[in-house]
Each structure stands twice: as structure tokens, then as C-alpha cells.
Image (cartoon, grey):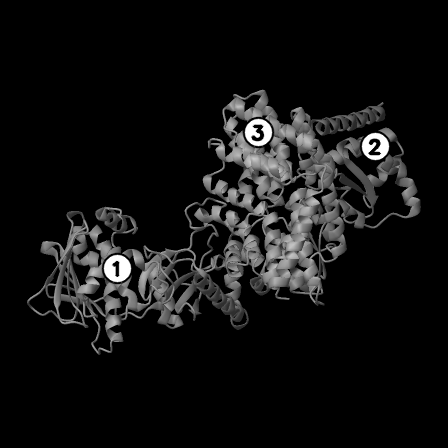
Amino acid sequence: MNLNFQVNLQGIIDLLSNHLYSDPGVFVRELLQNGVDAVTARKRLGHQTEGKVSVELFPSSHTISFMDNGIGLTQTEIEQFLARIGSTTKQADQDSADDFIGQFGVGLLSCFVMSDEIVLITRSALEGDSLEWRGKPDGTYVINKLQRTVPIGTTVFLKMKPEYEEYAEWYKMYELLERYGKYLETPIVLTEDKDSRLINDSTPPWRMDKPEAIAYIEDSEYDKPMDIIPLKSLIGEVEGIAYILPYAVSLQEEKRHKVYLKRVLLSDKMTNILPSWAFFVNGIINTNSLRPTASRESFQENDLFYLVRDELGACIKQYLMDLASANPDLFHRMVIIHYASLKTMAAEDEELYELFIRHLSFETSYGDMKMGDILREHKTIMVTSTFDEFRQVARVAKAQGMMVINGGYVHDLDLVRKLPTVDENVQVSVLDILSFSSRFESLKQSERDEVQPFLMLSDQLLANYQCQTLIKWFEPADIPVLFNINQEVNFFKMMEESEKEANPLFAEVVHVIKDELYEKPYARLCFNYNNPIVRKAIASGDAKLQRTCIELLYTQALLMGNHPLSGHELRLMNDSLLEFMNMGLDRNAEASR
Amino acid sequence: MNTRFQELRRSTWSMPDGKQKLAVLEEMIRVADRYMTEEEAYQARMDYSNAAPECGCPERMLVSFSWCLKKFEDNPGNYSNFYIMWHYKWVLGYVWRLPELSLEQIERVFEDFKEKCHTYGYSLRVYYQKRLNFMLWQGKMAEAAECYKSWRAAKRDSLSDCSACEQNMFGSYHFAIGHHKKGLQSLRPILEGKMSCRSVPQNTYSEMMLPLLKLGEYDRATETAKKAYRFIKGPSYLEEYGTFLQFFTVTDMPKAVKLYEQTVGLGLGSKLGWDRLQYFVSVRIFLKEWSRTRRRKKLAESELVTLGWLDQEISRLVQAFNRRNGNSFVEEWIREKEKVAARLQSAYGTA
């Protein structure tokens, strides 16, 4: 024997009506949508009636009515609409207007949030009977045939629960009707006693021309947008505008696009209808074909959704490309305002990269420069992978006539590396900090012979600090040494520390990683043969004096470069400083003797 | 120095995952080691352990973890056993991916973890789950099957992965042993949206693509790929990028090229033998197909990454695994992978 589960209908209705929607006011949206759908359905039958939705308030009894002159409902349809709630979501073409019965039922359920009883009076354009349906949140209902004949269409009466009585008041209902229905084509009229007012006589922003749209945004958002970008997607039947924000926005901030479905407001805080790189605009968008989720507060993220989003993204890109040539001033202002985020987006998207890269500024060995200028003046470009490396070489690089860009800021390294894709004559290399100084001018053989003992001494002294030395001739002359270190050194110290501290088992693991996966990094200390002090130190031939010089130059270079000094290094610096002081004092004493 | 430390810490918050972020965290550790308390140095390393895998350098996590583990062992009262065990769990997932470590060393790591589970009152569920992969990818199928059973039988506790992740791994296991239909079946709760977490279902999608192709479900496979591709981002997905590369080589060459150019730097930088091997095998499949026709476009890193170089690099890694495992499972497995790729190419290839 087959038995059916008993489902608690009241529970289901409670679930749908109280938990599906985020705001109790959505019943207004649902009833408007039902009314408008009914009007559309009636037009499809070929009826020439002018569609209309009338909302009337009866504040003394806390009751409202929503009346449309649409297609109306037959008795069978009424019986169906609750039964079909579950089935509608499975249908492939649920939002075709023909299937408004199922949607009608879901929409009606939202009224149970506000009211303990729904009364619906209707006459179908297909049959003659005037019908009255009374439904309760426990799922029970009665249908009566009325004696009198009512006009074709549907009227819904709601008596507001005490806690929602204000929804039957003018100001509240007006606000909600305007919020959801301002741009509907079917006229919506709100009436209380003798007062009547048409809600929707305004042009939607996506139908406005540019000056109108700018004025509209300025009026509603209190900020004058920089420009308006028209949006269109054929497959999504989307029309809309995106307005460029006149202030910088963080990429972390949630976007709030206003989205209308068939001209009814679906959400005014949709985050993802435009691609994430389009952070610098807000959109106002109407679609006829995207599929809403059950709560009708967002869209189902199906393939169509993503196709539409890509199409809208393409509109924005095309507009920007045109703007760059048509109105370079405005374009430039936009780049300045949205600078930080534009970089992020150019790093991720090739077309935008091409569009923007020449307008972006970078920190270089020649100071801050726009990429357009950099490319005009330099065909060989080096980029550091960290901020620290840039700091180490910037001054020397400039004196040597090298164009080095600081890749240490977020995204800059990637942006610079991609340069050959926009200019095939440019050569970009990532600067290897440890071989940087070997590019400088080498010494003559005779000079090399002269410095040999000095170099041997310094290599020997600094080997314990994982530092190798060399000597070159470079500008500027006032820099005695160039100290370069790559960041692997920190990691290497960390590995040594771990190997020393870890338990025997993991000391083995760390040992393997240290010895077999990583090469031991050495720092480089390059003496400048162009510097008088270095020259004097070499010429002195006094090993003890040279030793103190080398130690001081080394520790000073560490300090100058902001590198943390180890205990050993600190002692080295102190000892050599005291040594020098002592030497000076001794000499003074000798002189005065 | 405390200010310097805080300053560095703040700067990491807005940095994208990558080597630069790790460099800053490494500097923080140096500062903490020298000027701050052991607890702060410990915490800085725990943060580092969290970040390293996301930044594409899981082996670095082993380094910070080793230090923390010892401090924890010395003073178990000072630190949470849960967090260190949570990281230990990750360690079990990484150690076997390094062919430089011997089986004996890895066994000892597993043994130590097991003991600590007993000591601190955790179920062995995670132990078996992680051991499963260790066995599986050495080709010890019977042991792997045993682990699978013990895993599912052991009690879930706070150390276990979330149910969505576990469900996902049931699927992976079945795919790995060639039971594609069974695999898809276990993934159903995920695909129907009943289970999800931070990494599921996007992981699930990328795991399913190739099995679907093998089962002849081309449309479903491409649809899944499309979904998955939107979610996969950042340096921690090298193995997945390989899978995608292989998949797009068959279904959408221009997309494969784009993906290759975006990820090859990551592959070259990877130190984890297993992930590196998987990725470059996919690259070889891609590059062979790409080189079939004469092209004007030069691919990124085309000087270094040639078919010759790939042969060498893959063979070097395969030999390392052969040596470590004492069998030729990895070698055969890769040969099989390339055979399947060739078969898919002739069945669906668009070239």
C-alpha cells in the first residue's frame, strides 16, 4: 500500500513567507509583479484594455487592496496556484509570462507575513464567473462564486496584523510602491479616500540621455558622477547605465548595483552583476531575461548570468577605450581618482592592461614616472621584485644610467613584466640583486693586482656573515660600498634556526629542505674604486687598519640598508668603532707630544 | 622594534598571496626572534605556517612548523595543542610529496603524529586519511584500501577535516583507483549543493573534469570546467592548474595557452617534487600538442621550458620518486596519464 507523507502545510507556508524574504516590505513587490504579469498576460490574449494597477488604503480598518485589470484567474487556476509552488522551480522556462500562475502563488505567500488572511476577488478573461478566495496561513481556503459580476482582473485584500499596521498608511505604502514600482510601464495609482496619485511617471535612468542621467544620479546619490556608461546585453535583454564614481573606492568594499527585473526593483545592493574589475562604477540595470532566485532578491548564477556579466563588462571596456581618445582629460582624471584599483585590474585583464598601462605611474631610479614616458625614453628596463631591493640599488642605478623600476608595490612587478606585450621593442628583466654590482665597470689588470690582497682580506673577514666581496668602479663616487642581499637570506636564517631548535626527527626534515631544495644565498659587498676612502684604505697597506675599515663599511652598510644586525655584527661594529676612536685619540696624543 | 613588527604585520593584510608576502612574514620572524618574546615568535611562525601553503611554498611551512613543534613539546602548557596538531595534519599531506625525504623518515613522522594523537586525545581519523594518500601514491593499493576503511570507521572529531572536504576526498580516492562512476556517486551531495565549505565545491569541480571526459560525458565535463575555472585563483593550486591545462589542451587551446602563461612561473618556482611533477607532466602534454602546428606566437618562458627540458626535468623527478619508493609506480602512473591524454586528444581534440 502506498502512503503519502503528511506535510505540515502551515509550517511550509511559515517557512516560505517568513524566512525566504529579507524584508517584510517585499509583499508590495510581489503584488506589483503579480498585477503587472496579469496585465501582460491579458494583452497577449489580444485585449485592447489599458492596463492599470490600483492600490487603495483603508487606514481605519488597517486594510489595503491591490487591484489590477489583468487576465484574472479561473477556478482551476486558483486551485493550482498553491499546488504548483514547488513545481515551478523545476521548469525550464519558469519566467516566461505564460507561467505566471506558479509565480503568482509564491508571490501571494509573502502576504502572510503581513496578514492572517488573504482575500482575493477575481474574474478571468477566459471564463465568466466572479470568484472570491479566502486563504489562511494554515493552508486552508474557501472559494465562493459571487452573485454580482466584478470587472475582469484580480483584487487582493489584506488586513494588516497589528505589528504591521503602518503598512496601510500612505507614507509607508507610497515609499514602497515607489521603491519597487517607479519604473513599471503599467500605471500604478495609490488612492486613499479622495486622494489619488500616480506613482510611476518617471523615465527610468537607462532610458535617459547623458545629462539627464548625470542629474538623476547627482540628485539621488548626492554625488555628481564623472560620466555615464550605457550598458546593453542582447542575450540578457539588459539595458542599463554604469556611472563612474567621483571618489576612490576600496576593492574590498561590497558593490551595490541597483538591479531591476522587468522593471521591478529586485535589489539595490547586488554585488556581482558587473565584473569585479569594474569597481569604479555603480550600475543601474534592468533585465528581462535573467532568472531570479526563489526569494527574488538576486539572480541564479547560471551560464546566462555569466554571459550577461561578460557582455556588460565588454560595454564598459569599449567605452573606456573610446574615452581615452575622445576625451583624454576626463580619462586622465578618472585614472588619477581610481589609481590603486586600476592597477589591480590592469594586472588581471589584458585589454585593460593595454588601455591603461601607459597612464600608470611607477617609482623608478629616475623618480616617479608615467609608463608612457618611461617607454619613450628607455628600451631596457629592469624591475626589482621587492621594495627592499629597489632601495638597495636606486641611487647607484640612476648614477649608472640604468632604468630600474620598483616592483615592490603590489602588482607593479607583474605590470612591468608584461610590458613586451604592448611594446615589442622594450626589454624587461627582473633584476637579480646579487649580480647587480657585477654589471659595473671592471678594474684594469694593474688595479686588480693592487686590490687583490684587500679583497682576500675582506672575503676572509666576512665569510662568517655569508657575504662575498668584490670591487668595481661606479658612480656616484661618494658611496664607498654597495651592499646587496636578497630576501632568501632571511629564510635561510630561519631554516638554520629551525634546524638547530627542532627535535631530531624534524631537524632531519629541515636539513633536507635546506640542503636539497634551496641554495645557500650570499650577500654581496661591492667596494667602489671610485671612492676616495676606499682608495686610501687599499693604499694604506696596513692590514689592521684595513680590517677595521672593512668591518665598519660592512656594518654601516647593514645599518644604512635597514637590515637587522645580529649580535655578532653589532659587536663587530662596536669593536671597530672603538678601535677607530682609539686610533684617533692616540694620534692626537702623539701630535701633542 | 615592536612598532616595526606591527607595521610589517599590517602590510601583510593587504598583500596578495605570493613570495613577497612570505618575505615580509620572514622579516617579522627575524624581528620577533631577536627582540620579542618566545610566544610572539611562536605566533609569528604559526601565521607563517598558515600563509606559506597559500603562497605556493608549502615546504617553507615545514620549516616554521618544526620550530613550533619543538617549543610546544618543551612547554605543552604554553601553546594550544589543537593548532599545532592542525598544522601537523597539513605536514602529513606534504612530507610524502618531497622525494628528497626517505620512506623511513616519512614513516617516523606519521608514527610521531599518531603518538601525539593518543597523547592529546584525538581520533586517528586524520591519521588514516593522510596515510591513505601516502600509500596510494607509492602504489601500495592494498594498504591504501585498508587506510580508507580505517579512515571511514574512525570517529570524527575536531581535528577532522570538515564533512564537505572529506566527502570530496572520498571521491578523489575512487577516481585515483580508477572507479570513476563510484567517485562521481560519492560527489553527488556536493554537486547537489548539500555540502560545501571554503574549498568545496571548487576543488570538486576540477577533480571531476578528467574523469567525466574519460566516461565520455564531454558536455558535462566542459560545463564543470567552466564553473571550476572561475573559482581557482592564487598560487596554491599548482596541481589543479596542471589538470586544467591538460583539460583545456583537449577542449580549448587558446584558453590552455593563457592558463599556461599565467602559471608557468609558479610551476618553475615550486619546490615540492610531487606538485612540480604533476604540473610539468601536464605542461608536456600541452606543449606537445601546441608544437604540432607551426606557431608565430612565442610562449612565455619559451627559452627555458622546451620539450627537451621538460623530458629532463620530468625524468629527474620520476627517478627521484622511483628511488625513494623503491618501485616504478610513479613512472608507470605518469605513462598511463599520458596515454589517457593521448586517447582523449584523439577522441575530442579540436586541433
Mark 1–mark 3 Cα distance, whole angstroms, equals: 56 Å
Q: Chain of mark 3?
A: B
Residue density around tag 3, few if under 14, some if 14–19, many if 20 or more, within 10 Å: many
Quadrant placement of the C terminus of chain B: bottom right
Residue density around tag 2, few if under 14, some if 14–19, many if 20 or more, within 10 Å: few
Three-letter code, disc 1: Glu
Q: Nearer the viewer, residue A421 or A238?
A: A238
Three-letter code, disc 3: Tyr
Residue B156 position (above or below residue A239): above
Measured from the top left, where is residue B7 in percent x and y? 55, 38
Residue A471 position (above or below residue A261): above
> Quick one: label 2 or label 1, which is nearer the N terminus?
1
**Element assignment for label 3:** helix
Measured from the top left, where is residue A19 in percent x and y? 29, 48
Left or right: where B170 falls relative to A512: left
| Residue A368 visible, this orientation | no
Mark 2–mark 1 Cα distance, whole angstroms, equals: 83 Å
Q: Which mark is residue A30?
A: 1
Quadrant placement of the N terminus of chain B: top right
